[in-house]
Image (spheres, rainbow, N blue to C red):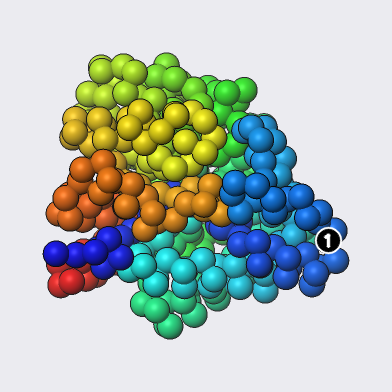
Amino acid sequence: MNSIKQIPKAEIHVHLEATISPELCRKFADRNNVEITEDLFEGEYAYSWDDFYDFIKKYDIITSVIHTPEDYRELTYAYLKECALTNVLYVEAMVSSTHAKQKGMTYHSFLEGVAEGAKQAEKDYGIVSKYIMNGIRHLGPESVHATAKEVLENPHPDLVGFGLAGDELHFPPKLFTKTFDMLKEAEFPITVHAGEWDGPEKIHDAISLLHPTRLGHGVRSIEDSSLVELIKDLDIVLETCPTSNIATKIYENYEEHPVKKLFDQNVKITVNSDDPPFFNASVAGEYEVMAGLGLSDDELMSLTKNAIQSAFCNQATKEKLLNKILNQ
Ligand SMILES: [Zn+2]
């Protein structure tokens, strides 16, 4: 009945700074007098990079062109507009105050830029969006703690959760328990990147030490059936990003990716674009991947429901979004 484009969609795992298109990257670089070299734009993806560590390096260079709240406003609006055109109803994007501060913005000024873009996109296209502040693992536990503390001390209506991103292999969950105990105590929603690069043992640690209700990726849980059962028992939702995992060579192709197996084992999954232009990914593209793996329209809709039900926005927003799905 539906084409993929018409199916209502939602996304809860995307890094806002990493949604920057080559066009905006060039525009901001010009505006902010940042020198970028043309070789960043060559190759298979919208940006060129070799392996994961080169990806992190290029990610830093490309996002370094974002300098002002106005840049954040424009970036937010552009991404939400693109999503809305493929019937994405809700986006929960991760943002980094660490990045904003490195460029001279304040916690409040960059969030206002994001909020302005979000408000305008909702007015123009009806798309709802909320934001998750990320702590960056490889900047160390103290940096992550300061980032979380600032969020708790300065609540913002659009900031609905806290996430942990960055180098999973060298910065394991046990380093961050103090921060995540504090967030749990404050009843602030938590998601943690786990089980993308590292295996089941670290996913176990992330669950038992950091109190997440969702896991970023989490796909390597498939390697341990008792862990899959635990994730189901605790009703933890996996924010899977199949195209991202294939681009970074964690899996060879979609057939080998565990996303369909996890779905078949009744794990609650969602599909997400992660860092869209870096992987030529999009929300609609991930739904298409799942259709290609055999999901029916109703099953694709169940992914949207999972995303909205596990979203960190308030109950009234969730109900409004769920009603919208039912009426489409
Ligand atoms: Zn991610």
Say above or below: 214 vs 20. Answer: above
Asked where in the image residue 111 lies, by quadrant, the reply is bottom right
Q: Nearer the viewer, residue 314 or 262?
A: 262
Query: Please, what secondary structure does the residue beneath circle 1 have?
Result: loop
User: Tag 1: Cα neighbours inside 10 Å, few (<14), some, or many (≥20)?
Assistant: some
Give the residue at the far bottom of this rendering. 124
202 on left or right of 70: left
Is residue 318 shown left or right of residue 284? left
User: For this view, does 281 lie left or right of residue 328?
Assistant: right
Q: Name the residue under label 1.
A: 34
Is any part of residue 145 visible from this angle?
no
In this view, 95 is above or below 239: below
Decide if ligand 1 comes within 8 Å of the CB at mark 1. Answer: no
Indicate whether 48 appears above or below 319: above
Q: Where is residue 169 in the image (x, y as percent from the top left)?
A: 57, 23
Residue 164: image x %, image y %? 53, 39
Query: At which x and y percent is residue 133?
Result: 54, 51
At 18% from the left and 71% from the top, the residue drawn is: 328
Front-lying residue, 62 or 292:
292
Q: Residue at x 48, y 41 (%)?
A: 244
Which amino acid is tagged 1? Val
Would you say 138 lies left or right of 15 here? right
Count of numbered circles in the view: 1
> Which quadrant of the figure contains the N terminus?
bottom left
Name the residue rendered at 61%, 73% in the picture. Answer: 74
